[in-house]
Image (cartoon, rainbow, N blue to C red):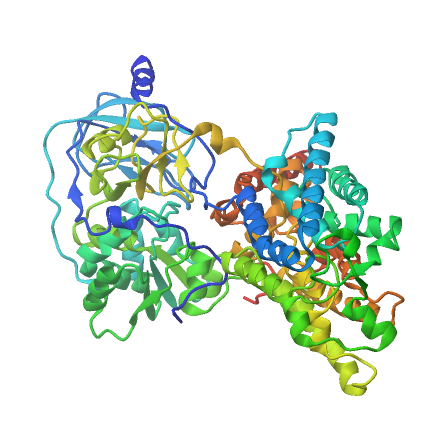
Amino acid sequence: MEEKTAEIKQGARLVVASSPHMRSVDSVPGIMHTVVMALFPVVAASVYYFGLRALLIIVVAVVSCLVTEYAVQKIRNKPVTIHDGSAIITGMLIGLMLPAGFPLFGVFLGSFFAIAVGKQLFGGLGFNIFNPALLGRAFMQATYPVLITTWVSPRTVQKAVDAVSAATPLALWKFEAKATLLSDLFFGNVAGSLGETSVIAILIGGLYLRWKGYVNWKLPLGYLGSMAVVSGIFWLYDPLRFASPLFHLCAGGAMLGAWFMVTDMVTSPTTPLGQWIFAIGGGVLAIIIRLFGGLPEGVMYSILFMNAFVPLINKHTRPKVFGEGVKE
Amino acid sequence: MGLKTFERGIHPSYYKELTASMRVEKGLHPKTVIIPLGQHAGTPCEPLVKKGDIVEEGQKIGDVKAFVSAPVHASISGKVKDVDFYQTPVGMKALSVVIEGDSSVKEWTGTADLAALSPEAIREAVREAGIVGMGGAAFPTSVKLAPPKGRAIDTVLLNGCECEPFLSSDHRVMAEEPDKVIWGLRALMKAVGAQNGIVGVEDNKPDALEAVKRAAGADSAIKICVLETKYPQGAEKMLIKAALGRKVPLGKLPLDAGVVVNNVGTAVAVFEALNYKKPLIERVVTVSGDGIMEPKNLKVRLGVTFEEVIAQCGGLKDASKEVEVLNGGPMMGIAQTTIAVPVVKGTSGITVLSQDAAAALKYNPCIRCARCVEACPMGLMPYKLGDQGRTGMINEFKEWGGFACIECGCCSYVCPARRPLVQWIRVGKAKSRREEKLAVKAG
């Protein structure tokens, strides 16, 4: 026996871990920071159209999210995880969903609610049922119903006092039956939330994420596709009364929602079939709210509504185990 | 593109270039060997020798009367120094025979006429030679060759995928001994009465593909099947799906799909057992990894210690660094607690990886990115199973198909939160089994 133990001692320092002993290079912070990068074109577009005020709102939202996450984790005596990038994303998305004239204290309140209630109350990253940014936006919608729908025209907010208030393309269409130029919608030269107006900026970021492999293509495709199909049916039925599918895809929060919120990993289903159900369900809902609801925009509620069903969807769309149901 | 394969799976970095083109070298003749009596799946053997006995190379030193078992043989001539429990590379201690060798080496030659051999004779010879699956699982080959009555086997599928990163032993066997591979395949086909033989090889081994193709010649019964390079292509069920398009029913064996799967190395062992009357006493082992000085493919005697084999490959790059020494490759290999363990029948490789012990234990919360679901070749939801296993939700674990997991490691590999999913699934299986046992006792 002595000999055996001697042999063991000769060995180098051995690490003993469970297989597999090789890991892919992807990490949670890596994914989150890539999403932050993907949001930069959107931030740039928001600053271009709504001035430095846009940047200020986004920065306040991000800082508020980080501070809230830090404070809650300190109070709960949990490890601080503000470096993982997820709170930055929540902050950026909150900022990008607000109008340029929104009060900064309100930005802080919404961010606080998103992180404290929407995320940390559920147990932190990975445990939240609802998209925290959307929950924060819903909270602000309830708290500041007027201010959150007070839009300004693009390229007029060099000084806050000069800002020209205006209606969004969706509101123009819904309440005044006015159309907006598609090219303006595409580039973002319309009134609206900071980061929702420029379709091209969102597409650049979204396609970058897709290229990096961090977006499941089923989600944006299912969401935007079903929006197009449902709005298309109504448009074909009565093109004078209903807006075209292209308008619906380019207006409001559709693009930002489809590429950056429907695709949120934590709050979307994990099964292939479930992802289709979630995305298509959300898209249909968004159009129904837009066409028949009291609000001009339905993206936020459509996603939050579908978020609630994710555990149920996952449970009932479990993929077939290999060889299940195969006859001998 | 368009190559045959299975659904899902992963594309890890393979690092095959370290050894893929290196000819198999003969390992140094060991002075001492440790031969575990249980180095196969099934009942361990009982020793047929005792301390002080003189044994000859190839002499049977352990056997047992059990269906699922395979005898073991002395890999060198010499004197039995000890019969005691020794650490094996598959995790537990096992009763082992330690032989101190003299320098004599036996020559194994001969020829056999396959046409003159009956299926029973082939099966018997395979059992007597102690042949087991050499891809790693070490399941006794003779058992695979004796399907239950009424179960028709139409195809013998040789597994030359070698989808584990770093490993190249199967690759070299096919490239250097293709005639033995094909002869062995024909013998296996005859033993089970199969009309078709297929060799499945991934497309990252073009020279091996060429070699086995040439060896098979114009024989219409044997097909060489080129497969996409993807992990775990070499898992039995995945290989059957890829090569034949058949799905093994859940919870069943390949023979339930009319197929017997064997490793290419096993086919060579069958050739040598029938022609040379040589039992399984040596095998090709790939020694590789970023922690090894000179990666090599070595043909070594069974029972030689990892330590000696590593020494023949220039030793460790940096002995002061923490390394992981694996029996097998990085995806499914078993980490060793000591390098005094012997090479066994299932040791397809010794992989030495530099590793950070502290980092290996860290993991983050699941962000439900679904990468594990997209990777799992068995169509499971590993993140769920992992949590169910970890927290002991036995009923849910079984309901969600936990026992179908083949522990290939794809889920843990792709997990950006570095959660040890396979480990937790193993825990789930163990907890379920324990629960069942208790239920039976209480029953």
Q: Position of residue A93 (x, y in %)?
A: 69, 51
Image position of B55 with respect to A114: above or below:
above
Q: Position of residue A89 (x, y in %)?
A: 64, 47
Count of marks, rendered view:
0
Quick check: can you spot residue B103? yes
Q: Is residue A222 left or right of residue B287?
A: right
Q: Position of residue B325 (x, y in %)?
A: 35, 33
Task: Using the image as rendered, state which of residue B124 and residue B430 is in the foreground.
Answer: B430
Residue at point 23%, 34% (across, down) = B293
Quick check: can you spot residue B150? no
Q: Quadrant of the C terminus of chain B?
A: top right
Q: Is residue B82 left or right of residue B407?
A: left
Q: Is residue B125 left or right of residue A304?
A: left
Task: Using the image as rendered, state which of residue B163 and residue B249 is in the foreground.
Answer: B163
Image position of B55 with respect to A124: above or below:
above
Task: Using the image as rendered, state which of residue A146 and residue A86 is in the foreground.
Answer: A146
- The image quadrant that residue A218 belongs to is bottom right
Q: Position of residue B360 (x, y in %)?
A: 48, 33
Image position of A56 with respect to A43: above or below:
above
Q: Quadrant of the N terminus of chain B?
A: bottom left
Task: Using the image as rendered, state which of residue B67 and residue A207 is in the foreground.
Answer: A207
Residue at point 82%, 52% (across, down) = A138
Q: Is residue A266 left or right of residue B41?
A: right
- The image quadrant that residue A196 belongs to is bottom right
